[in-house]
Amino acid sequence: MNDKQKTFYLTVFQYHNMIDKLFKIFSNHTRSLEILYLLEDIKKAVRLDANDIELKQIRKFCNKENLHLEVSDFKVVKVIDKGKGAYANIVKKVPINYLEPGLYHIYISKDADKAKFLKLLENKNDDKAIGELLGYPKCCVDFFMENREKQQKIQNDYILPALDNSQGFKFPFYTNYAIRYFDITLLSHFPHSFYCEESINMAKNNLQCIKNYSKELANNFETMLKGPVLYTENNGVFSFRNYRLNNNILEFNNVLPTKNNELLTMLNKDKKIIIINKNQIELNNKIIEDVGFMVFT
């Protein structure tokens, strides 16, 4: 093996090693990839959460990578969403000396001022400025602010409002934020529409970044992001595999759920959904309303 080949294989190994390294420290794809985007200058700052044990590892990592880390002066306790696995869109702030298990919010950037400013903005509860500093599209920040009051009274999830802003039910897979409940997403924010051009461009850049490090992971993400999704606010999120869509009839062989319940039993029984519209389906001769049906391609 010549020197050029050695360099190539060493680079490939290091790339794969970086993904593995991040996953071991940050424990899931969503958090690990946020840090990868930061290291690659795709993002200027990130906000994550961490428990005491994770925080120790993250401090060591940030010191080694010359990243600036700020830690919240409070802890948060997750309010787990109904029907979405262990995911939480709402957190409750508690004192730093809270005796029960809690999480810190952490703010990381290559720029010390950005990390400090992000912490300051969170202390002021300035969600709009936080979104702007995190690099979210202005249209999506405005969308979040417009819907925040209503959605925080439910589960602080913006999938259905985004669907209302999107014509039809077939969308580019880049904006599939509905299956983040399976730890798969190319975005860090709720898109204001599943056609949002800025969000699509961000997702494309993020996917290319993943591909640079691991083609296998990038291909797995793309495969999972493509396909039909049935979203409900409280009754589960369902991703369909090995499917056929003919006009308004979806037939499928497999379904991945966030919740094992009566709706999953109905889906597995008939293996077919009649789509009345994007918010209404027929399943086993029963009309189910107030859902979100989407197909990402």
Image: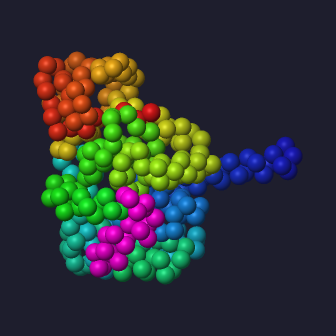
Give the residue at the far front of this rendering.
Answer: 167
- On the image, the x and y values in percent for residue 196 come to 42, 49
Q: Total of numbered circles in the picture?
A: 0
Residue at 58 percent of width and 48 percent of height: 208
Q: Position of residue 148 (x, y in %)?
A: 23, 61
- The x and y percentages for residue 21 are 54, 56
Q: Is residue 48 above or below residue 11?
A: below
| Residue 48 visible from this viewpoint | no
Q: The C terminus is located in which quarter?
A: top left
Inspect this view and state whether residue 92 appears. Answer: yes
Residue 144, relative to residue 278: is it above or below? below
Magenta part of the protein: which range?
A: 121-140
Residue 61 to residue 209: above or below: below
Classified by dominant secondary structure, the portion drawn in magenta counts as helix
Picture residue at 40% right of the left edge, 23% below the top: 242
10 left or right of 83 in image: right
Q: Residue at x 63, y 52 (%)?
A: 15
- Picture residue at 17% right of the left edge, 39% below the top: 290
Residue 181 highlighted magenta (yes or no): no
Image location (x, y in percent) of residue 136 = 42, 61
Place residue 92 in its image quadrant: bottom left
Q: Is residue 158 left or right of residue 135?
A: left
